[in-house]
Image (spheres, rainbow, N blue to C red):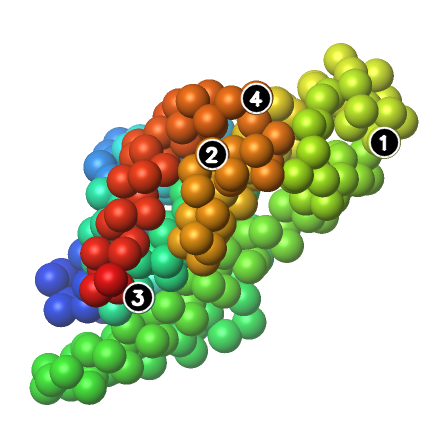
Amino acid sequence: MGSSDRLELRDVGVPGILVLGRYRHSYAHVGLEPHSHPGCVEVCFLARGRQRYRLGGRVYDLTGGEQFVALPDEEHDTANEPQDKGVLYWLIAQLTPEDAPLLYLDRRQRRQVKKALFDIPSRQFTACADARTLLDDAIGALLRPQNALSRLRAAMLLAQYLLGTIAAATAEQERLVSEPVRQSRQYIADHLAEPINVATLAHVAGLSATRLHARFRQEIGQSPGEYILHAKIERARDLLADTDLSVTDIAHSLSFSSAQYFATAFKRLTRATPTSFRRSLHSERGQ
């Protein structure tokens, strides 16, 4: 019959980490029913074997060394297949609300890591080379008698794992992004202080505006206009955090047509006004 062991740690005492699990199966087990994780991201790492997942009507066939990510509220299962033999790790981390603690990170670090996880461009990709070592060491730290240092060590290891996951997913996306879209994104990054329109991007990319729009949608899941707005708001968040520029000055520095439009767009994407976002940062820093 073979052997099998499964370990699932819950309420591990590390901020924001709800579940950390590992199984080593020498035979197939019952598959996963459709489920989701409200407000949480699930990151699976298949160290050895094969495993199938289904998300959003698409099936992902993983082989050893690959990761699978399900974002908050995304229903997924094993596509009526068993949990196959092999070695698999899973981690469930809380992403909302934005101010919820995560891995002892400060507010800005939490925001950056959570945003990067929310924005992961791929659901399946090759994991970083040290993924298994980081996870095994984190589990080992949490299985030892609990104290502040063991929890801190586990948190540092899991932070490395999540950062490696983000880097691996981004590298996978870059391999899939065409040169016209890559050129357009670089142009946007270099010209955030200027008005940017799709016609200009199309000229930079050497495509028609219609074709460029289709490429953005296909390759990164956003229209050029949406991508530009998100990039400007992300820069605005950094300026609110790191400078004393007024909200109006920040709006003008990023070529928004008015401070009111900037504030409206900022709240739509961040669920906070520029003023309340800055105030909360100052409160956290004790200013």
Amino acid found under the numbered disc labelled 3: Leu
Does residue 212 appear in the picture of this structure? Answer: yes
Measure the alpha-carbon separation of dots 1 and 2. Answer: 30 Å
Measure the alpha-carbon separation of dots 3 and 4. Answer: 35 Å
Of mark 1 and mark 2, the one earlier in the sequence is 1
Amino acid found under the numbered disc labelled 2: Thr
Residue 248's mark? 2
Q: Secondary structure at mark 3?
A: loop
Of mark 1 and mark 4, the one earlier in the sequence is 1
Q: Position of residue 79 (x, y in %)?
A: 38, 33
Query: Which image quadrant is residue 97 in?
Result: top left
- Which residue does the image show at 56% across and 27% down from the upper left? 256
Binning the other alpha carbons within 10 Å of mark 2 as few (below 14), some (14 to 19) or many (20 upward) gives some
Q: Which residue is mark 4?
A: 257
Residue 111's mark? none
- Which residue does the image show at 40% across and 28% down from the upper left? 263
Residue toward you, 287 or 208: 287
Q: Which residue is mark 3?
A: 105
